[in-house]
């Protein structure tokens, strides 16, 4: 008797699942060409299936993986390469997936680790991906989400200060690799926020118990303090002469500095065109990761 009930229940669930998938397919707009990527309507999905949000998020994610050839699926044959409009639809669909199940990490990873690289020449789409990741940051406490946000900002959009901000968030989360703390300070320094970079290093020195990391942080701090000295000397030069020095040696010629401080990483400090200070070592030595 019990086996019969289980068998009938299994048949019922199988039939219900088939009906569900048919209904889901009907939510997609009617296509004139097979190449057009459909956009899933969040409001319609939630109205029709309010209790199946997580299951549908998983279903739509698998459909996206199938379309892009990711997540272990072989890429679906298409007559043309994805256009900007295609990628925009995919990113919009991923936002729908996030809204259906905001704690589902895999879709965030797909757009950060794959789609960001596919649309790297389109700043507007990178920013749209970033908006999706910011949405996920509210729900998924995984250090990789702010890490990808920071990476997108400094690598694809050239905004090192914003990149450092999100990498700093990532570095403070459980499971984050220790090199993120070093990378955060370097990005702040490269964007000219020396005081921020020094503050990050000093805070990490208070908290870290890792002796190897502590030595790297102390070395980075020494380099940053040298850079801060140079910035102060440049500020004095500007107040006296109303311009940026032509090079760092001019700070010595004009009697503001006795000598240029040494870079503990073995590089040479120099003046960039925007009057900011940087070093040929990029604030890292041979044994440093970042």
Image (spheres, grey):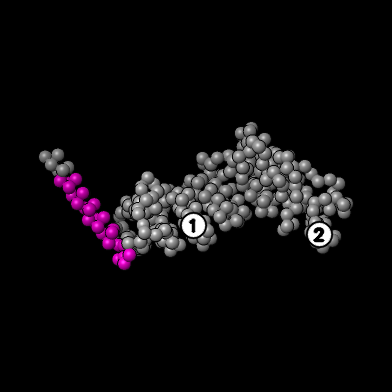
Q: Say if the magenta span includes residue 93.
A: no
Judge by depth and name the residue closer to the eye, 202 or 232. Answer: 232
Residue found farthest to the top? 211
Separation of disc 1 and disc 2 at Cα? 42 Å
In the rendered structure, the answer to whether residue 232 lies left or right of residue 189 reads right
Label ID, residue 173: none
Q: Looking at the image, which residue is at 36% across and 48% down?
A: 74
- Residue range in magenta is 8-33
The quadrant in which the N terminus is found is top left
Q: Horizontal and vertical percent for residue 219?
A: 70, 39
Residue found farthest to the left? 1
Label ID, residue 119: 1
Judge by depth and name the residue closer to the eye, 271 or 26. Answer: 271
> SS for tag 2?
helix
Judge by depth and name the residue closer to the eye, 16 or 66. Answer: 66
Q: Horizontal and vertical percent for residue 55?
A: 32, 51
Look at mark 2 in the image and give the residue it sits on: 238
Judge by depth and name the residue closer to the eye, 233 or 47. Answer: 233
Q: Horizontal and vertical percent for residue 154?
A: 59, 53
Q: Horizontal and vertical percent for residue 214?
A: 65, 36
Residue found farthest to the front? 79
> SS for tag 1?
loop
**Can the viewer see residue 128?**
yes
Q: Nearer the viewer, mark 1 or mark 2?
A: 1
**Can the viewer see residue 207?**
no
């Amino acid at each position: 008797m019990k086996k019969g009930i289980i068998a009938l229940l299994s048949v019922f669930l199988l039939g219900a699942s088939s009906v569900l998938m048919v209904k889901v397919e009907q939510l997609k707009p009617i296509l004139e060409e097979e190449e057009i990527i459909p956009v899933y309507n969040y409001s319609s999905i939630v109205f029709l299936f309010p209790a199946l949000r997580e299951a549908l998020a998983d279903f739509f994610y698998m459909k996206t993986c199938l379309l892009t050839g990711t997540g272990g699926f072989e890429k679906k044959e298409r007559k043309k390469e994805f256009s900007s409009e295609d990628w925009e639809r995919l990113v919009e669909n991923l936002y729908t997936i996030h809204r259906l199940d905001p704690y589902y990490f895999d879709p965030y990873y797909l757009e950060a680790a794959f789609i960001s690289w596919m649309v790297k020449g389109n700043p507007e789409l990178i920013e749209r991906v970033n908006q999706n990741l910011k949405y996920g940051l509210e729900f998924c406490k995984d250090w990789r989400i702010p890490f990808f946000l920071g990476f997108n900002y400094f690598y694809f959009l050239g905004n090192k200060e914003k990149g450092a901000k999100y990498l700093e968030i990532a570095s403070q989360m459980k499971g984050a690799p220790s090199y993120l703390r070093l990378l955060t300070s370097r990005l702040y320094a490269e964007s000219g926020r020396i005081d921020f970079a020094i503050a990050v290093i000093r805070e990490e020195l208070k908290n870290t118990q890792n002796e190897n990391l502590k030595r790297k942080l102390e070395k980075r701090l020494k380099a940053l303090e040298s850079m801060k000295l140079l910035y102060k000397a440049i500020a004095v030069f500007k107040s006296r002469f109303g311009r940026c020095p032509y090079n760092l040696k001019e700070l010595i010629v004009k009697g503001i500095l006795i000598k240029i401080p040494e870079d503990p990483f073995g590089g040479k400090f120099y003046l960039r065109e925007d009057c900011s200070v940087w070093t040929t070592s990029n604030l890292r030595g041979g044994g440093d990761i970042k």
